[in-house]
Image: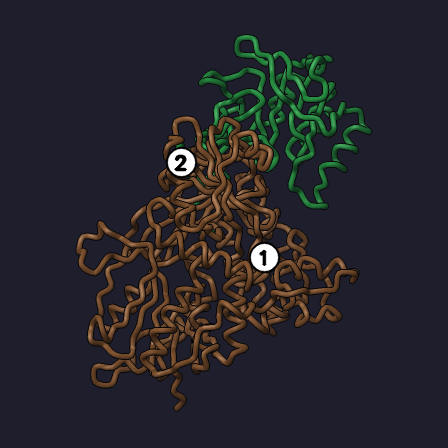
Chain colours: A brown, B green
């Protein structure tokens, strides 16, 4: 039976980046994910590539990590990052002294923070609240978390890693006190199989706590829910932050053709982490605060609301959870708990995913006696680079796909599928086939994450039947068409119900009457 | 402009009402905003055109914006395109449908009927407007204007004598107007 060097548990951005790093250092690597890639918090956040400015005042180390990684990701994943720039604005009632201190802290952390006049801020970004009294320009950017995770997964596979999706880790294989693999099963199946490895790395976000418990280890974690709203327009071209102590709804991030406002921060019980929804109350709060940042949000169409769970880690010495850290946490359980063969990587941020992977892979290599150096900061991720020559005329059906997948479009067969299936996001049959073959999607929600199908203006209202037909055909399961539609509608409903008024209510009635035989 | 009856809403319910009143010899105006969800079998545009050809005054692409009341009677309604020309009539039929057709509007706190400010039956609190399961029956699709036994609309708890409601705008369980009763009361007088 094959024994891997490393099994990474968790297919979010941390697990994906870790699998890539391990594979690049020559370790035989398996990544196990219970659902689809990017289905947890990695796909439910702002899509903000932090400059570190947000943490400059409160967490110098975090800020320094952010700005370093910000520069690296721009270099190795240019097709996932949009260099929008960011503003920190001070509003009447906020303190200009805070802004002064903020700029000083940013500079000490190596972040290029430039104070500008309110007038200049309005010229750069006309959407900001015109009552602002101060503004600072920082190198924040917008990053597509789905694309970034996919790029890491694809690179890991190209370096020999195996990706096992839709498999739950149900327990660990032990020998004496040592962890020497995991037991996995498909959802709903009782039968499990054992997969052996010299080292198991837990990179499962908030779900890490439960996995560690199965290994007899206690990691003090707090699930912290963050709710966000997506608006149907790109109301601002830059990331807009409020220049004050981090609080609710104080960041608006443009991404593709939408804007994301967030977030909140509330402790939730562990029982809730598998079914996290934004509530109407959270939406009310987000809107109230968001409108003071960008007034036009009050009459911008809301597409949906959603929520993710941050894995906050308690300091080991602290039982009551008051001192939680958002910093990177690498736990070597042989050293910490006397359980050899197991490591945990958690905490951190989307922006610092590569660094998290480097830190845990260094620890793994040290235990396994592997000397290879980390090269993830030097080598570009798949998709980056020039997708076409400067003077080349790009056909219309390829343009959106190039924006999403960069040079990966060379793997799509447009001769057999340039028919556009999703009009809003211009997704072709060829892109659907690519997602099925390369990324192993199984339903429309998966397809959404990897192609943006149904993420546009109509949110699938008009194209859903066409999408289901095309996907069922590509999966070779033509009878699943209705099931695919039902699953998608349920997911869309989850996003629309927290914003259930105005045009959303009109859309809801349209959905009910078009997709149900009887209402 | 003076009519015997003004029907507000040119979907299936409004078209049927206008046709019935016209057939009873009444001078009828139909206001049709064109925001319906019917399929090609019940194409309201086609219906609107047929009614216009028969002699109903059809205001296509227009919508009612407000009304003038005196006591418990509606005197006239205004439309977006004819804002200085009130449409007067003896009887009014509200057939503007639900949310998609903008018969009912909503904001974060409330649901309301925009033309008359008619009383709407709905559950307070947005979280009560939907069922989290898409496939379950949805409360919001049962919301609509309150009516009396004859299908007459009320405003501020007071029944409006000459304002009737038909179709999707009527709350679930409330009575729709009986067109025969309207004809009996208002035709040929």
Q: Nearer the viewer, residue A345 or B34?
A: A345
Q: Are marks 1 and 2 in contact (CB under 8 Å)?
A: no
Total labels: the figure holds 2
Q: Is residue A487 visible?
A: no
> Is B174 left or right of B10, judged from the image as shown?
left
Q: Above or below — where is A371 with respect to A426?
A: below
Q: Is residue A141 visible?
A: yes
Q: What residue is drawn where x is 72% and y is 41%?
A: B43
Q: Nearer the viewer, residue B60 or A488?
A: A488
Q: Residue furthest right?
A: B53
Q: The numbered mark 1 sits on a residue in which chain? A: A
Badge 2 element: helix
> Is A193 left or right of B101, judged from the image as shown?
left
Q: Which residue is mark 1?
A: A452
Q: What residue is drawn where x is 65% and y is 25%?
A: B8
At which x and y percent is residue B31? 69, 25
Which of the two labelled residues, at mark 1 and mark 2, occupies the earlier sequence position?
A: 2
Badge 1 element: loop
Numbered badge on residue A100:
2
The image quadrant of residue A235 is top right
Alpha carbons under labels 1 and 2: distance apart: 40 Å
Q: Quadrant of the C terminus of chain B?
A: top right
Q: What residue is drawn where x is 52% and y is 76%?
A: A157
Q: Above or below — where is B161 with respect to A232?
A: above
């Amino acid at each position: 039976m094959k024994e891997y060097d490393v099994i990474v548990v968790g297919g979010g951005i941390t697990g994906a980046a870790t699998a890539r790093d391990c594979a690049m250092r020559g370790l035989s690597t398996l990544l196990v994910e219970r659902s689809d890639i990017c289905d947890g918090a990695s796909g439910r956040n702002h899509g903000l590539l932090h400059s570190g400015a947000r943490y400059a005042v409160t967490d110098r180390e975090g800020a320094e990590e952010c700005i370093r990684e910000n520069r690296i990701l721009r270099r190795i994943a240019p097709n996932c990052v949009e260099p929008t720039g960011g503003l920190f604005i001070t509003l009447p009632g906020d303190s200009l002294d805070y802004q002064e201190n903020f700029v000083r802290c940013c500079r000490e952390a190596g972040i290029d923070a430039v104070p500008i006049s309110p007038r200049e801020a309005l010229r750069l970004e006309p959407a900001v609240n015109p009552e602002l009294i101060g503004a600072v320009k920082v190198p924040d950017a917008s990053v597509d978390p789905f694309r970034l995770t996919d790029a890491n997964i694809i690179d890991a596979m190209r370096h020999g890693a195996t990706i096992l999706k839709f498999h739950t880790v149900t327990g660990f294989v032990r020998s004496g006190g040592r962890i020497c693999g995991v037991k996995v099963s498909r959802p709903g199946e009782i039968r499990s199989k054992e997969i052996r490895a010299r080292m198991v790395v837990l990179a499962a976000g908030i779900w890490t706590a439960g996995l560690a418990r199965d290994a007899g280890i206690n990691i003090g974690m707090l699930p912290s829910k963050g709710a966000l709203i997506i608006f149907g327009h790109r109301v601002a071209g830059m990331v807009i932050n409020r220049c004050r102590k981090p609080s609710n709804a104080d960041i608006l991030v443009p991404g593709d053709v939408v804007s994301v406002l967030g977030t909140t921060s509330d402790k939730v019980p562990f029982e809730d982490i598998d079914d996290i929804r934004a509530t109407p109350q959270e939406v009310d709060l987000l809107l109230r605060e968001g409108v003071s940042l960008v007034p036009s949000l009050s009459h911008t169409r809301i597409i949906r609301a959603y929520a993710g769970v941050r894995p906050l880690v308690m300091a080991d010495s602290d039982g009551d959870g008051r001192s939680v850290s958002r910093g990177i946490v690498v736990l070597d359980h042989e050293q910490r708990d006397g359980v050899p063969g197991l490591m945990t990587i958690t905490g951190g941020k989307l922006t610092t995913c590569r660094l998290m992977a480097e830190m845990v892979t260094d620890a793994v290599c040290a235990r396994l006696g592997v000397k290879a150096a980390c090269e993830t900061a030097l080598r570009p991720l798949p998709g980056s680079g020039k997708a076409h020559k400067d003077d080349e005329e790009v056909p219309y059906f390829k343009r959106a796909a190039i924006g999403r997948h960069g040079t990966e479009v060379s793997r799509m067969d447009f001769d057999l599928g340039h028919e556009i299936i999703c009009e809003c996001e211009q997704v072709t049959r060829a892109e659907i086939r690519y997602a099925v073959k390369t990324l192993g999607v199984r339903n429309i929600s998966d397809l959404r994450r990897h192609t943006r199908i149904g993420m546009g203006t109509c949110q699938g209202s008009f194209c859903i039947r066409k999408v289901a037909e095309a996907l069922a055909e590509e999966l070779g399961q033509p009878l699943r068409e209705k099931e695919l539609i039902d699953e998608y509608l349920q997911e869309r409903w989850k996003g629309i119900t927290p914003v259930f008024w105005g045009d959303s209510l009109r859309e809801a009635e349209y959905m009910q009457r078009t997709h149900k035989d009887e209402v | 402009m003076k009519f015997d009856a003004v029907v507000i809403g040119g979907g299936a319910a409004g078209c049927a009402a206008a046709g019935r009143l016209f057939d009873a010899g009444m001078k009828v105006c139909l206001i049709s905003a064109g925001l319906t969800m019917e399929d090609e079998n019940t194409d309201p545009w086609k219906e609107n055109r047929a009614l216009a050809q028969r002699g109903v005054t059809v205001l296509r692409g227009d919508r009612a914006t407000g009304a003038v009341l005196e006591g418990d009677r509606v005197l006239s309604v205004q439309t977006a395109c004819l804002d200085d020309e009130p449409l007067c009539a003896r009887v009014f039929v509200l057939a503007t449908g639900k949310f998609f057709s903008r018969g009912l509007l909503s904001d974060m706190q409330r649901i309301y009927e925009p033309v008359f400010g008619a009383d709407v039956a709905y559950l307070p609190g947005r979280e009560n407007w939907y069922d989290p399961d898409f496939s379950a029956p949805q409360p919001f699709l049962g919301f609509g204007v309150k009516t009396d036994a004859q299908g007459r609309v009320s405003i501020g708890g007071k029944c409006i004598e000459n304002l009737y409601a038909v179709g999707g705008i009527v709350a679930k369980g409330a009575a729709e107007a009986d067109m025969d009763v309207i004809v009996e009361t208002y035709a040929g007088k």
